[in-house]
Structures are given as structure tokens and as C-alpha cells.
Amino acid sequence: MKRRCFLALTAVLAGVTGCGNAPQASDELTLRLIQPKDRVPAPEFTGRLLSSPQVFNPFASQSPATVINFWASWCAPCRLEAPQLQLTYEEYAKEGVSFVGVNSNDSETKALSFVEAFHLTYPNIFDPPGRVAAKYRAIVSNPQPGTVVVDRRGRVSARIVGGVARDDLRHVLSQTLSEK
């Protein structure tokens, strides 16, 4: 009985605080737009695509913006944001915006099931040890879920710690795409 109560409480707390370690400051659970003068270069990375030996580089093309979403199949907020991310990807693909998911701390089987369940059509990198998330830890302290938007110059224009809402992501993309 005590074990069941503990597991139930753990599940509730995971849903409230996100899936990774809880951020230290309350303002970490927010969307942060970064002014062009204050932007830093996004850490570059490559990774193996889920169920494929192909290595993917999200920065290989000259995209006007790149959305990087960190997720895991066991993360409840990740499950809530996945359909929103797919819809936003479909909406902005015609403008050349790149999307890439980065799955870590997961099994490939569960990650593939997640991608299939939510009909994700943008590239997803399988990074079980979390090397890519580690590169972004200074930007997104709680990587699952976490989203980073990179501008056309390869600089971080926004970060969202926690689940991303479609309207918030659309606002960030609109701002980032309007810059020259």
C-alpha cells in the first residue's frame, strides 16, 4: 500500500514539475525570448536518427529558424506537447523552418512508439546518453521537455523550459522569422 501511494505521488509530482530535475528558480519554467544583441551561438550537434543509421545535422541547411525539442517517451508533458509541435512543424515547413526532436534517456523501441503514436514527421535524433541535452544544459536547464529556437544566424533566439504551447511557439517563430 505504501509503495502504491509513493508511486502515485511520484507520478503526480512528475506531471507538475516536468520530467527532468526541477529548475532551481521559478522563472525557469517560462518562455524566454532573447534579444538579438544578447544571443549566443547554439551548440552544434549531429546525431543518429531513430531507427536509422543515418546521421542528421540540423544546422546543415540554411534555415530561417530551427526548433530543437528535447523529449522522452516517459515524459507526460512531452506527450501533451507532441501534437502541438507536429502541427506547428506542418504550418512552418513551407517557410523553411527546421524542426528536430532529440530523444534521450529512453529506449529506442519506446521512442519509436512515441513518434508513431503522435505521427511525428520531422526528424528525431536518438541520443540515449543525453549528450546533446548536456550541450544545451546552460540554455535549457530542464531538458525534458525543453525547446530551443535558433535564428538564421545560428544563435539561440528563445528557450522554453517545460511543455511548449503551440501559440507560444508560433509567437517565437513569428518574432524570429521577422528579423533580418
Image: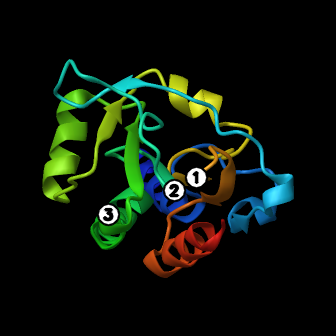
Q: Is residue 79 visible to the viewer in this orientation of the structure?
A: yes
Front-lying residue, 99 or 51 = 99
Q: CA distance from mark 3 to mark 2?
A: 10 Å
- Mark 3 lies on a secondary structure that is helix
Q: Is residue 98 above or below residue 43?
A: below
Residue at 80%, 64% in the rendered image = 35
The amino acid type of the residue labelled 1 equals Arg
Q: CA distance from mark 2 to mark 1?
A: 5 Å
Compared to 180, does 135 lie above or below?
above
Q: State the residue at coordinates (66%, 47%).
A: 140
Q: Are marks 2 and 1 in contact (CB under 8 Å)?
A: yes
Left or right: 151 as drawn, with respect to 8: right
Q: Earlier in the sequence, mark 1 or mark 3?
A: 3
Q: Nearer the viewer, residue 153 or 76?
A: 153
User: Which circle marks residue 65 in the picture?
Assistant: 2
Amino acid under label 2?
Ala
Which of the image's four quarters has the C terminus? bottom right
First-in-chain label (2 vs 1):
2
Residue at the disc numbered 1:
152
Q: Which residue is mark 3?
A: 93
Give the left or right position of residue 100, taking residue 165 as reference. left
